[in-house]
Image: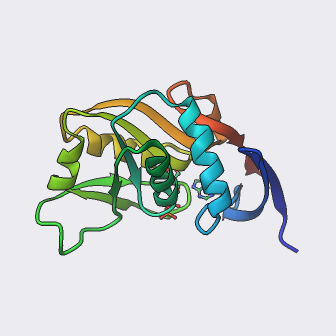
């Protein structure tokens, strides 16, 4: 049987499977994709803690259901950064992204027209989990490519050292398993 970590968040309990990242570190995999009950509950709790905003910004893939639900509950729109350039992006703005779960570099991309939906707006950056902060940094870099104000950076979970950060809003910490 795979080892698990018991997570209590937004009034719900989930058993997260522990997965190997490398010889020295495991993570408890937090997968909200497919978990509508948790997504709805976490979005509601997070919105209570976040400042007023005009538009949400998130990253493909696991950030999408959370941003969608926060958008639905708040009535505010969201913009999603994709992990690659699509043929329907005439003017893609691309930044590099490195996250704890992915070996090597990824890309985050938003087409200019989509990016400019944030222009002059108060932007709340959201993701399911913040760990190294690499993905959050890439989202911030994209937001900085237009005239907007980032009013908050929020995630359901802050993993490892991210739980000590004072510049993010989160519901619960998530440990890293070092050995
Ligand atoms: O703080 P970091 O170290 O960047 O880790 C956090 C990021 O990692 C996960 O995405 P992942 O790269 O696994 O991609 P996915 O959502 O496409 O599965 C998660 O959804 C965050 O975006
Ligand atoms: N614990 C975790 N589970 C899933 N994706 C992650 N990205 C960063 N940390 C993660």
- Residue 127, position in %: x, y? 50, 49
Please, which colouring scheme is shown? rainbow
Q: Is residue 48 left or right of residue 152?
A: right
Does 21 sit above or below residue 138?
below
Residue at the (23%, 72%) spot, across then down? 86
Does 165 sit above or below residue 118?
above
Residue at the (65%, 64%) spot, across then down? 35
Q: Quadrant of residue 110?
A: bottom left
- Residue 108, position in %: x, y? 33, 57
Viewer can see residue 31? no
Residue at the (60%, 55%) spot, across then down? 39
Give whichever of 48, 26 is nearer the camera: 48
Q: Residue furthest left?
A: 90
Q: Quadrant of residue 89?
A: bottom left
Viewer can see residue 106? yes
Give whichever of 2, 110 is nearer the camera: 110
């Amino acid at each position: 049987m795979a080892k698990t970590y018991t997570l209590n968040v937004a009034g719900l309990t989930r058993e997260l499977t522990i997965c190997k990242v490398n010889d020295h570190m495991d993570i408890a995999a937090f997968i909200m994709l497919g978990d509508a009950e948790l997504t709805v509950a976490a979005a509601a709790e997070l919105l209570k803690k976040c400042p007023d905003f005009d538009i949400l910004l998130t990253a493909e893939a696991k950030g999408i259901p959370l941003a969608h639900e926060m958008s639905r509950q708040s009535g505010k729109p969201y913009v999603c950064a994709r992990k690659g350039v699509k043929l329907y992006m005439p003017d893609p703005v691309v930044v590099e992204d490195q996250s704890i779960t992915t070996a090597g570099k990824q890309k985050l991309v938003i087409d200019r027209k989509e990016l400019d939906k944030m222009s002059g707006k108060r932007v709340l950056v959201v993701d399911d989990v913040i760990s190294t902060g690499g993905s959050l940094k890439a989202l911030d870099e994209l937001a900085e490519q237009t005239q907007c104000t980032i009013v908050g950076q929020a995630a359901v979970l802050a993993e490892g050292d991210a739980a000590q950060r004072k510049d993010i809003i989160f519901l619960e910490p998530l440990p890293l398993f070092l050995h």
